[in-house]
Amino acid sequence: MPAPKELDPSASLAALYGAKLRKLRIRAGLTQRQLGDKIPIAHSRIAQFELGNEVPPEDVNGKLDVLLDADGDLIDLWGHIRPTPYPQFARRFMDLEAKASKMLKYLAQVVPGLLQTEAYARAQMRIGSPRQTEAQIDEWVRGRLERQRILRSSSPPLLWCILDEAVLRRPIGGPLVMAEQLAHLIAWAQTPHVVVQVLPFAAGGHPMLMGSLSILSFSRGSDVVYVEGSHSGELLKDTDEVARYALAYDLLQANALPPDKSLAVIHGFMEEYQACEPS
């Protein structure tokens, strides 16, 4: 049997929770499978909790606290790291995003979180997490809107976004929500630090057909890359990997419409959605 993966409790609050959970489980003389059976959940979920890659739902955390005789310690810890729609790897990326001086983004399916309206963000959250309560959705939406302070700071980063045509065609939240969202995009694209391009379907194939891409640059330090699929993401710092995705982004920019023509296209979609609104 392979040795258990080393934990670094200082890496994050989720990692601290995971280290505490493993310590309590071992003290109780239980394997991950045995503990999972008692809840019941898959033992692989217990492993993800212990590694800090996933935070348990509130009800599961309560059961863990009781089963492991934690005397409320797990409940207290959970209160500081209650689940968000972002897994640990995405939270690490967002921490870096807040420090970036330049962001290059390609979005395959949705408007980037930094440019979303409240209604659009809420609709996306509901679609992605249909079993969550409205109270939880409200909290997540507040968190997403809070992140947008990055663009309203006294020294905002340059944000250059390339949106796949699919982003404009998919009416998340319905025509009214989309019309408002596209008007919001147009307004941001007219500020000095936000540039928006549209990659039309007519451009054909491109290097990021399988997902979205962000490249972050900093006033000090090397660039990092974040590649994201519908249910996965990876933060990359290796120089060769970063260079490979930088080239991919260059190709996306070359095939996308210029910013002025992109705004005209977005405006056209906005008018179409507005025409769908009930009179």
Image (spheres, rainbow, N blue to C red):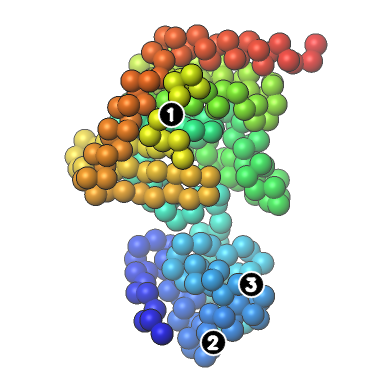
Horizontal side of residue 125 vs 261, given as left or right = right
| For marks 1 and 3 on the same chain, the one whose residue lies earlier in the sequence | 3
Q: Label 1, secondary structure: give it.
A: loop
Q: Residue 30 carries which label?
A: 2
Q: Residues within 10 Å of mark 1 (few under 14, many from 20)?
A: few
Tell me whether the residue at label 1 lies in contact with that at label 2, contact meaning CB atoms closer than 8 angstroms.
no
Q: Which mark is residue 205?
A: 1
Q: Residue at x 40, y 30 (%)?
A: 206
Q: Residue 34 carries which label?
A: none
Q: Residue at x 48, y 50 (%)?
A: 232
Q: Label 3, secondary structure: give it.
A: loop
Image quadrant in which the C terminus is located = top right
- Marks 2/3: CA–CA distance: 14 Å
Front residue of this view, candidates 263 and 206 = 206
Q: Where is residue 20 in the image (x, y as percent from the top left)?
A: 46, 75
Amino acid marked by disc 3: Ile
Q: Position of residue 155 (x, y in %)?
A: 31, 27
For residue 83, above or below residue 65: above
Q: Is residue 98 visible?
A: no
Q: Position of residue 220 (x, y in %)?
A: 19, 40
